[in-house]
Image (spheres, rainbow, N blue to C red):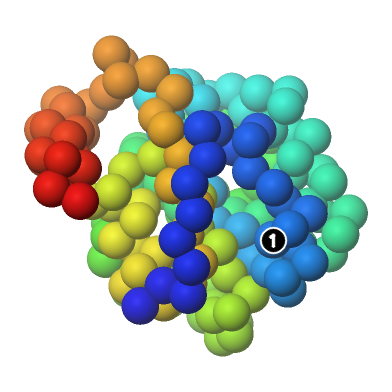
């Protein structure tokens, strides 16, 4: 199971220095509603700055998305149609990067995909709030309903 579970309002609110000081070196970001709104192809400038900062510290950055393939306007390795929360596709592609799980962080906005994905990988997870709940895939809207129910039970 995940080594840690943290929460932040957005990617910009994450204390990346703290994660780096804890030895985190592989960052797996969800895209839709974590980095930008659903179906976007744009990586916002504030996220680009975070990616560049992490790279300057020797970290590896990946986007792991259940979304369809898109042409992003920033050069970053992406695993499209990742089938989260299942881990087999990500493990097959990132095998060596996932060898030391204590160095890996998953960052995403959904409990039933991103958080479970991180837990199944056995890595640290940072759950952020979705950027825009009004623009989402229909299946995601259903999962959001169950997330609300789950939050009330916790």
Write down the quadrant of residue 149 in the picture.
top left
Write down the quadrant of residue 61 in the picture.
bottom right
Image quadrant holding the N terminus, namely bottom left
| x then y, percent, for residue 80 | 41, 48
Furthest-right residue in this view: 56
Q: Residues within 10 Å of mark 1 (few under 14, many from 20)?
A: some
Label 1, secondary structure: give it.
Answer: helix
Q: Please, is residue 92 above or below residue 134 in the view?
A: below
| x then y, percent, for residue 64 | 46, 52
Furthest-top residue in this view: 134
Q: Image check: 48 left or right of 140?
A: right
Give the residue at x 63% y 35%: 13
- The residue pinned by badge 1 equals 19
Give the residue at x 38% y 24%: 38
Q: Image check: 67 left or right of 45?
A: left
Examine the rendering and report whether any part of residue 88 can be seen.
Answer: yes
Give the residue at x 41% y 72%: 2
| x then y, percent, for residue 126 | 49, 52
Examine the rendering and report whether any part of residue 93 can be seen.
Answer: no
């Amino acid at each position: 199971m995940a080594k840690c579970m943290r929460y932040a309002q957005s990617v910009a609110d994450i204390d990346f220095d703290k994660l780096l000081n804890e030895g985190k070196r592989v960052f797996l970001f969800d895209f839709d509603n974590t980095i930008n709104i659903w179906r976007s192809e744009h990586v916002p400038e504030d996220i680009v700055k975070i990616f560049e900062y992490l790279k300057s510290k020797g970290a590896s950055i990946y986007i792991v998305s259940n979304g369809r393939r898109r042409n992003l306007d920033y050069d970053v390795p992406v695993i499209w149609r990742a089938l989260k929360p299942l881990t087999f596709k990500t493990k097959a592609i990132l095998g060596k990067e996932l060898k030391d799980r204590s160095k890996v962080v998953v960052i995403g906005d959904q409990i039933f995909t991103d958080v479970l994905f991180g837990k199944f990988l056995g890595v640290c997870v940072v759950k952020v709030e979705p950027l825009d709940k009004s623009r989402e895939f229909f299946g995601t809207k259903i999962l959001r309903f169950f997330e609300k129910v789950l939050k009330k039970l916790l």
